[in-house]
Image (cartoon, helix red, strand yellow):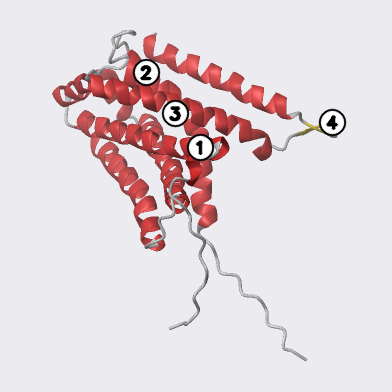
Amino acid sequence: MSKRKPYTRELPSDWWMKQLFYTKYMIREGSSVFITLYSLILAWGVLRLSQGEVAFNAWMHSLQSPPAIILHLIALVLALYHTITWFSLAPKAVDLWFKGKRLDDKVIVSGHYAAFIVVTVFCILIITL
Amino acid sequence: MPEVKEKKYIRSHEPFFWGLFGAGGMLTAFLTPVMILITGLLIPLGIIDKGNFNYQAIHGFATTWVGAAIILVLVALPLWHTLHRIFHALHDLGIKRGRDWQMVLSYGFAFAVSVFTFTLLLQMY
């Protein structure tokens, strides 16, 4: 056994509540919890789908309960927050050069938002039409 | 003269998980909001007609191989993103005990739900 005793700095568990930057970071990380729950609801829906029409309709019906609606509302807000943070980081990942010049960050970010709107409208149209 | 030792690099599994994290993050950014909006709010609240979201249509879609693949990706891929973040958030919250087990549980959870969904789709096919 090593006799070494490294110094570990004390970290209060609420360190992320003291600065807005860190709080926003933790909200982004926290969005993962709700998106995980949403994925689990969908995975459960696949199970109910495999069990036949009655089971699937019961699953659809359970989504109408007020707690389910509230959960999905929170998940939607956090998912949108994830989208915003993801798009604002996009210029760091997308390094596009055009005619010897690096594409402006604003172009990349607004391109993502444009694609997001197209995808969203497209999905709603598939379901409703 | 001191002997120059060649540094040994240990292969990391991080790139693999990070790839799934990135792909999942992309999918989550573009599709999760509209998915939640449709399945969680618009349909349950009756704002849009169930339209194509009824048992026959979804079952028909899920039993084609393209449809099954799409459903698997939509359900499971975000988990590889979110569980990666949750695993690292546990560190941020200062939970130091059993880091290796935290990792096994985090990615294991994403893996388990992926297998769960995959198996169900395979069974329906």
Q: Identify the residue shown where x is 37% and y is 29%.
A: B67
Q: Secondary structure at mark 4?
A: loop
Q: Which residue is mark 4?
A: A99
Q: Mark number for residue B38?
A: 2
In this view, the residue in front, A124 or A113, is A113
Q: Which residue is mark 3?
A: A78
Compared with A63, A12 (above or below) is: below
User: Share a chain, discs 1 and 2?
Assistant: no
- Chain at tag 4: A
Q: Measured from the top left, where is residue B25 in percent x and y?
A: 50, 37
Q: Which residue is mark 1?
A: A23
User: Is the residue marked by circle 2 packed among few (<14), some (14-19), or many (20+) residues within 10 Å?
Assistant: many
Q: Which amino acid lies under the numbered mark 4 shown in the image of this protein? A: Lys
Q: Secondary structure at mark 1?
A: helix
Q: Measured from the top left, where is residue B40 in percent x and y?
A: 33, 21
Residue mark closest to the camera, 2 vs 4: 2
Residue mark closest to the camera, 3 vs 4: 3
Tags 2 and 4 touching, CB below 8 Å: no
Q: Secondary structure at mark 3?
A: helix
Q: Which amino acid lies under the numbered mark 3 shown in the image of this protein? A: Leu
Cα distance between the residues tagged 4 and 1: 40 Å
Instruction: Report if residue B24 is visible in the image.
Output: no
Q: Identify the residue shown where x is 31% and y is 44%.
A: B113
Tags 3 and 4 touching, CB below 8 Å: no
Taking the image as shown, residue B27 lies to the left or right of residue A37, namely right
Q: Which amino acid lies under the numbered mark 1 shown in the image of this protein? A: Thr
User: Share a chain, discs 4 and 1?
Assistant: yes
